[in-house]
């Protein structure tokens, strides 16, 4: 799935008021963390993840790794906050997040 810059901006705006649903600690990206991210993506479609640690390169690697392992789209990465989007179904009527054309 490919989103336009306007669609990404729309999702970033929706994510602004979200609280992180998954927090990644010093142990990094474990199998249980990926399962929790998968669960929340299926439930909410648009999620925010918080990463502990001050290493920007490590956070960027986690950001990319989550996208690869879950099939989610990388929406935003600012500081320790990561935002991901993945539609939970192909039926538009049941979509939780409505994306403009």
Image (cartoon, rainbow, N blue to C red):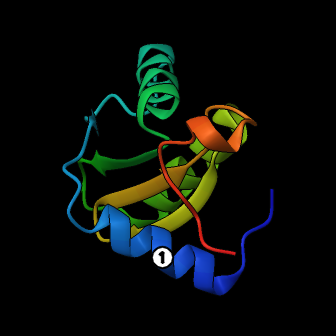
Against 76, is 35 above or below?
A: above
The quadrant of the rendering that contains the N terminus is bottom right
The answer to whether residue 87 shows anywhere in this view is no
Most extreme residue toward the bottom, as rendered?
Answer: 6
The answer to whether residue 62 shows anywhere in this view is yes
Q: Estimate the x, y position of residue 8 in percent, counting from the top left.
A: 57, 74
Most extreme residue toward the right, as rendered?
Answer: 1
Q: Indicate the secondary structure of the residue bearing disc 1.
A: helix
The quadrant of the rendering that contains the C terminus is bottom right
Q: Quadrant of residue 65?
A: top right
Q: Is residue 96 left or right of 19 when viewed as pictured?
A: right
Q: Estimate the x, y position of residue 29 in percent, counting from the top left.
A: 46, 31
Against 23, is 20 above or below?
A: below
63 or 94: nearer the viewer: 94
Q: Residue at position x 53%, y 58% from top?
A: 98
Q: Residue at position x 48%, y 64% from top?
A: 57
Q: Residue at position x 41%, y 21% from top?
A: 36
Q: Which residue is mark 1?
A: 10
37 or 16: nearer the viewer: 16
63 or 37: nearer the viewer: 37
Q: Estimate the x, y position of residue 89 in percent, counting from the top left.
A: 68, 32
Q: Quadrant of residue 43?
A: top left
């Amino acid at each position: 799935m490919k989103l336009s810059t306007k669609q990404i901006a729309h999702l970033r705006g929706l994510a602004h008021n979200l609280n992180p649903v998954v927090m990644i600690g010093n142990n990094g990206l474990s199998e249980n963390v990926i399962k929790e991210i998968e669960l929340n993506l299926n439930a909410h479609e648009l999620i925010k993840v918080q990463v502990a640690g001050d290493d920007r390169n490590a956070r960027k690697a986690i950001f990319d790794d989550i996208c690869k392992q879950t099939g989610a789209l990388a929406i935003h990465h600012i500081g320790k906050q990561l935002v991901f989007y993945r539609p939970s179904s192909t039926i538009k009527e049941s979509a939780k997040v409505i994306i403009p054309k």
